[in-house]
Image: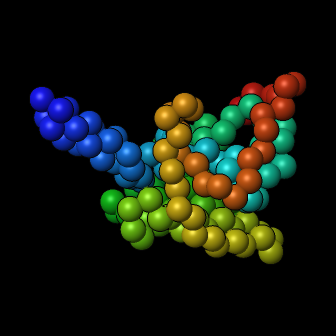
């Protein structure tokens, strides 16, 4: 009986630990933009929202492939590329200016907040934040 319990416990631990793998849909809906440095840094210090779906409409989102998501709003361009499970390269460019960044992150799923995050930074949601419209 102990052996069966041990095997079941081991299988449960392996199936729930690290089983989540990010998809382009997850990046659009559940990637917490507050966890990376980007052109949205100042916006995130002002607005309440945190996820790409809250800043980019579905018309501005292009699911190019299973591993590539492009978001374009005016001169603001974001390109997400999944290269390995939970390894994502994020490019962010302001085409009318000089801002251009490309960084690679190992993302993790936070079960407490039910979102995907990087460990680069965290920009708090201001207590008196404004809704993005």
The residue under the point 84% across, 38% down is: 46
Residue at the far front in the pictured view? 2
* Count of numbered labels shown in the rendering: 0
- Residue 40 located left or right of residue 33: right
The residue under the point 84% across, 32% down is: 126
The residue under the point 60% across, 61% down is: 78
Q: Nearer the viewer, residue 99 or 34?
A: 34
Quarter of image, res 55: top right
- Rendered position, 35 above or below 12: below
The residue under the point 61% across, 44% down is: 32
- Rendered position, 80 above or below 25: below
In the picture, the quarter occupied by the N terminus is: top left
Q: Position of residue 22 (x, y in %)?
A: 41, 52
- Residue 25 located left or right of residue 8: right
In the picture, the quarter occupied by the C terminus is: top right
Q: Is residue 28 visible?
A: no
Q: Position of residue 85 (x, y in %)?
A: 38, 62
Q: Is residue 61 visible?
A: yes
């Amino acid at each position: 009986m102990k052996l069966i319990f041990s095997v079941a416990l081991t299988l449960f631990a392996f199936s729930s630990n690290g089983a989540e793998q990010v998809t382009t849909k997850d990046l659009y809906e559940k990637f917490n933009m507050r966890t990376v440095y980007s052109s949205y840094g100042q916006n995130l210090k002002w607005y309440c929202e945190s996820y790409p779906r809250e800043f980019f409409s579905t018309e501005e989102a292009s699911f190019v492939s299973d591993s590539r998501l492009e978001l374009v709003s005016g001169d603001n361009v974001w390109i997400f590329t999944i290269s390995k499970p939970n390894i994502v390269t994020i490019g962010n460019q302001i085409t009318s200016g000089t801002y251009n960044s490309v960084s690679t992150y190992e993302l993790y799923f936070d079960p407490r907040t039910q979102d995907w995050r990087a460990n680069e930074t965290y920009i708090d949601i201001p207590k008196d934040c404004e809704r993005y419209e």
